[in-house]
Image (cartoon, rainbow, N blue to C red):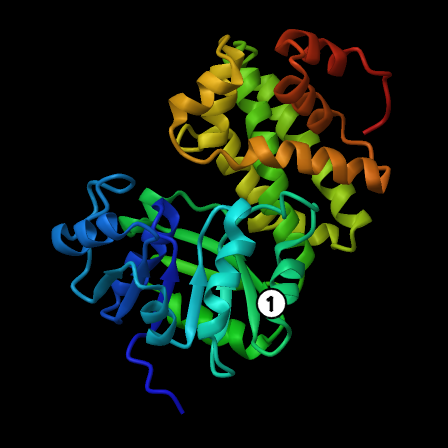
Amino acid sequence: MSDFAFALSVIGAGSYGTALAQSTASKGLPVMLWSRNKESALKMQQERTNDKYLPSVHFEDSLVVTSDLEQAIKASKNILVVVPSHTFSEVLSAIKPYLTSEHRLAWATKGLDKGTGRLLSSVAVEVLGNDIPMAVLSGPTFAMELAKGLPTAIAMAGTDQNFIKEFSDLMHTKTFRIYASDDLIGLQLGGAIKNVIAIGAGLSDGLGYGANARTALITRGLVEMCRLGIALGATDRSFMGLSGLGDLILTCTDNQSRNRRFGVYIGQGLSCEDALAKIGQVVEGYTMSKVIKDLKDKCNVQMPICTEIYEILYNNKSVKEAALSLLSREQKAE
């Protein structure tokens, strides 16, 4: 048996990865946080903060930052991957040589595989095999609020119920709660589609269309989420929970959401390139818009909101023209 010295190793030192590491360390548990950038890791370890993403949060004493991936994987049997979806496969391939049969892997990455549209769980099995327990965390979580200890709840689904229970207990704090789910497909789809709908909510608000339009877009966006989810084997019940409706409301209504702000900028007249530059961080919904469009075409599912958002982002359709297309669709029962 390996002598793991840390309770958790978090792979990815962006805002969300840092927040999850900080939250678990707040219990006094030893947590290792891995950053790809050696200089950034050294700076965070010395200054005890992530001044790029969470500048007002001071690290717990039990949080250790490293740029040594081997060290991070060997430090704990519990590995939590929190990287952008487009680097997910690459990161799993990098950690694979250091994994043992004692390891358990979870990820809080939201999205689908950029190249194929596959669920990240399928990517994980392809890269790592079925020898270790795996799970996904998803739900309405702004990194800064989590890092500051404000009340937060998310969901977790996976291949091993004992792992889900133990991992939930590990990360549970007085203000952070994890609910178990049995819908691995639904959890992952909800986390991907909500970012696209959030761009749509931002587009609407950028045009000044008001609360009525935003609420209608969220509600009908949830319908589109359910349609694609059911077509791919998810249960509609999961989309009524934290990783579906909960995350959708969060990202569509608060400007802490990068996807929402991205949409607002475009609605106000900025180009996609300028809006991305202004955000200055990964906007998952931009990439996911094309992935979801291809996936819904493959499944022959009607998703008019996601389709119009794709047309705006990739085919230069004007935001007002896209809105008119949605409003002029044939009347139908809810």
Q: Residue at x 47, y 62 (%)?
A: 94
* Residue pictured at 58% horizontal, 46% vertical: 111
Tell me residue 89's x, y (percent): 56, 55
Please tell me whether mark 1 sits on a helix, a strand or a loop.
strand
Inspect the image, locate mark 1, and give the three-letter code of the amino acid beneath it: Gly
At a point 40% along the width and 92% down the height, the residue shown is 1
Where residue 85 appears, x then y in whole percent?
Answer: 54, 47
The answer, for residue 222, to whether it is visible in the render is: no
* Tag count: 1
Q: Using the image as rendered, state which of residue 212 and residue 17 is in the foreground.
A: 17
Name the residue: 66% across, 64% down: 126
Q: Which residue is mark 1?
A: 158
Q: Is residue 205 above or below residue 96?
A: above
Q: Residues within 10 Å of mark 1 (few under 14, many from 20)?
A: many
Percent position of residue 236, x then y: 73, 50
What percent of the width, then of the height, locates residue 229? 74, 47
